[in-house]
Amino acid sequence: MSTEPNNQEENSKNIVSEEGNHLEIPTKNKPRRRLMLRLFFLIVLLLLILLVFILIMAKLRVKSDKEAIFAQLNNITQQIDEQSQRLSASESAIVMLKRKTNDDQGIWQLDEAKYLMQMANVTLYFQHNISTTIKLLKLADSHLSNVATPGVMEVRKLLADNISVLSDIPTVDISGIYLELGALNQQVEQLPLVLQLQDKTTLAASIPEVSKGHSVIVRALMQSWDAIKKVLVIRHHQTPVDPLLTPDQRGYLNLNLHLLFAQAQLALLNHRDEIFQASLKEIQGAIERYFVQTNFATKSMLHSIQSLQKVNISPELPDINDSLIALKKITELQMNKMSQETNTNNIVSGVEKDGV
């Protein structure tokens, strides 16, 4: 009986109040609710901590990525700078190479012209070939026309003067004269020797004819003289008369003339005018002394010999070394200039490498 009132009191606490329209939670459920709240707040706190951690990690990652990006940018910038320097160096090298190529081309043209001018000097003074000398000088001038080096115009002016002076010298046809001497030498065997002396004059051509006024004895003597002078011929010579040549002597004479012609040819090739003229004079004297002068072959040979005697096979030659000397000075200056530029460029390149 006593427990019933207590139970009723407890149950009265759980009865819903009609006036308040709400139910009261039993007191035994409050600890559970608090636990749930604590657990909820703990989960929220953990989530907040996790979110903060994630944000911090994200921020750190962004920072590291940013640093990496900046490092990469710096690396790329450095590479760009290096490439720019290399490109600039390459451009400088190309410019230097182009300049050097132009300088080398100019030096090559100068060397070629100098070689041609040296050959012209050798051809003129040793071979006396004026036409070939002029050709060589003109070819050297054509090489110099492609060079813009200071001083080249003065060399070209000297070349023009040399060519003009050489053009005024009469050309000697050495080959033609040599062949003509050879042809005359072959005609020696065909010249006729003097078999009888040709300058005949009769003695007493001015003796008067027999007249009727003379005595019989005088007329007889004069008629006898007329008969004698028909068979007797008296010859007058200003020089001593040589005896007629035997066949063996004719062979020696021909051999002597052959040697004289060969000597004249050798003197012609060596441009020894004094020996050339002396040989022709000896040939002329022998022909006039031993061969028939009225013969056509003799006359033709003497005419050819006299024509050759008028030729000067060794004319006075001008000095053409002035142009060559001037060109050598220009070439030396260009070589020294290139050497100095090369040394300067090597020093600059070394400094740039040390700086890098």
Image: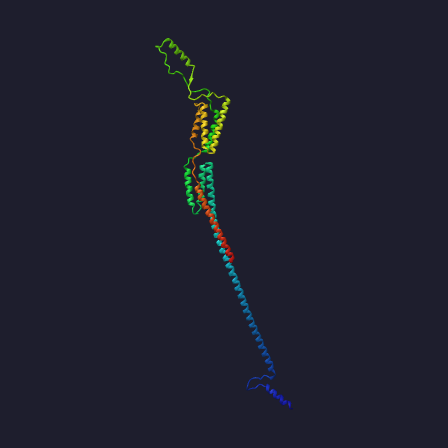
**How was this image coloured?**
rainbow
Q: Residue at x 39, y 11 (%)?
A: 221
Q: Residue furthest bottom?
A: 1
Q: Is residue 130 above or below residue 185?
A: below
* Residue 304 percent location from the top left of the image: 44, 28
* Residue 196 percent location from the top left of the image: 45, 19
Q: Which image quadrant for residue 322? A: top left
Horizontal side of 1 relative to 164 (left or right) equals right
Q: Residue at x 45, y 26 (%)?
A: 285
Horizontal side of 49 relative to 335 (left or right) equals right
Horizontal side of 26 relative to 266 (left or right) equals right
Q: In the rendered picture of this protein, how many numbered marks are placed on residues?
A: 0
Q: 311 or 72, which lies in front?
A: 311
Q: Residue furthest right?
A: 1
Horizontal side of 106 relative to 34 (left or right) equals left
Q: Residue furthest left?
A: 213
Q: 210 or 27, which lies in front?
A: 210
Q: 333 or 162, which lies in front?
A: 333
* Residue 75 percent location from the top left of the image: 52, 61
* Residue 3 percent location from the top left of the image: 64, 89
Q: Is residue 261 above or below residue 29?
A: above
Image quarter (top left, top right, bottom left or bottom right) of the N terminus? bottom right
